[in-house]
Image: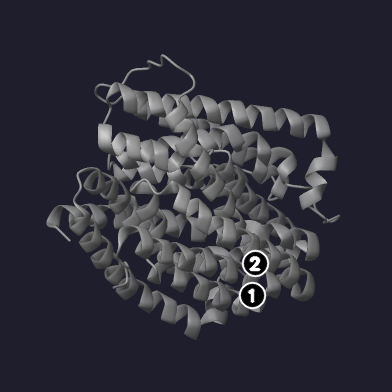
Amino acid sequence: MDANVLKKISATAFVKLGSGALLFFLTMFVSRTMEGAEAGAFLWGLSFMSAIAILFRLGLDSVIMRAVACGGVDEAAQATLYRGLIWILLATSIFLFVALIAGDALLELVWASEVVENPLQIMLLALPAMSCFMALGFAFQGQQRVVFATIFQNLGVTALFLLSFNALLEGGLIESTSREAEIIFVICSWIMLLFALVAWFSGEGVSFKLEALWDRRQLVASGNLWAVSCMNVLANWSAIVMAAIFVQAEELAYLSAAQRTAMLASFILSIVNTVVAPRYAQLWSSGKVDRVRSLARNSTRAMILVMLPAFSLVIIFPSEIMRLFGSGFEAGATLLVIMALGQLVNVATGSVAYLLSMSGHERDLKRVTFISGPISIVSAVFFTSQWGVLGAAIATAVGLSAQNLGALWMVKRRLGFLPIG
């Protein structure tokens, strides 16, 4: 791994660790300031919005990143971004209109609690903004501007929400309820979209120019990757969504806290992916397959070494870690261990999804996820209905492992090497 890549990974690590710490603190803050059912509703709503925002980016994340990584801010790359943003706005607007017409009948399909109001009644209003500023985050990632990429993929809205919610709470202007938090989150999301647009159009050589709203190549590529995104959501989030139907709102808080904490153990994967994904696209387009293989293997080995200490802490001290979220949260210790095992597989297999998507093998990635996706759905329905919140944790680990092991096999088949070799 060359010095330039290591330097960028170090810078990314600093920013990403800050983002991870904020997500952890957000979960802890909400769990400690709200009642159990209220905290469970809001944290579940955040998880649901994270999942649905992936779907409504329409598979354009990797398409935009690859275009900007290879073309910079040339006319074609910018057109790919602007076209994608318009598609996202159209899709989210249509969905919100349908949700408004259908009303509670649609939202109640994924929310069974009668104790707390459905958080999606308000939080869905953030969907267009979230989807767009995250798509812009991937454009910044393509430019390898890792600070902006991290801010607009997660860090910014989390920090702004925490600062705003805490300030209003301390000032006595709001109460610590899920409904108040949802309203503030929606406002923060739209503010972040404004910041993202200003940051992008402040760049050198950037201007809005779009000759055609439709592009067949972009449509095909994003279509394949959208199918992948759908299956990724099923692998990572179907059990969490299903849990809202089968378990109490308070248990959702335990599950959400365990999931977010387990993801911290694998945070190194997010750090490395931010840097190496656009690098894969550049090297592959230049025909430097040996350097792609070397970068993939070195980064995977480094990720495993970095993750093992964090994983060990989770396995040895799960109750103590969960107790940080408040009294009673130690009941989610087993959930944390199970989800951490799934994240271990996620890291140990390397950046397999990006290796396939950045090298133009979207269809092969789609084939993998069309197998792992149904496995995730069946696991989520069966395990969650049988064992409640414990089953949801098992289903999440199973779905994530199936997806990554399948993609690992496809990387070996198409690219000719294993990242863990």
Q: Is residue 182 left or right of residue 265?
A: right
Point out the tag, 2 or 1, that comes first from the N-terminus: 2
The 10 Å Cα crowd at callout 2, few under 14, some 14 to 19, many 20 or more, is many
Task: Give the quadrant of residue 268.
Answer: bottom left
In the depicted view, which residue is nearer to us: 105 or 401?
Answer: 401
**What residue is at 61 percent from the left and 45 percent from the top?**
52
Residue wearing tag 2: 255
x, y (%) of residue 30? 61, 57
Q: Secondary structure at mark 1?
A: helix
Q: Which residue is mark 1?
A: 332
Query: Do tag 2 and tag 1 residues touch (Cβ < 8 Å)?
Result: yes
Relative horizontal placement of residue 387, taking residue 43 as reference (left or right): right
**Mark 1 surroundings within 10 Å by alpha-carbon count, few (fewer than 14), some (14 through 19), many (20 or more):** many
The quarter of the picture where the N terminus appears is bottom left
**Badge 2 element:** helix
Tell me where residue 128 appears, x and y as whole percent: 58, 32
**Above or below for 312 versus 203:** below
* Image quadrant in which you'd find residue 68: top left
Toward which corner of the image does residue 10 lie, by quadrant? bottom left
Q: Residue at x 51, y 58 (%)?
A: 368
Q: Identity of the amino acid at label 2?
A: Leu
Task: Single out the residue that lies furthest toward the bottom.
Answer: 316
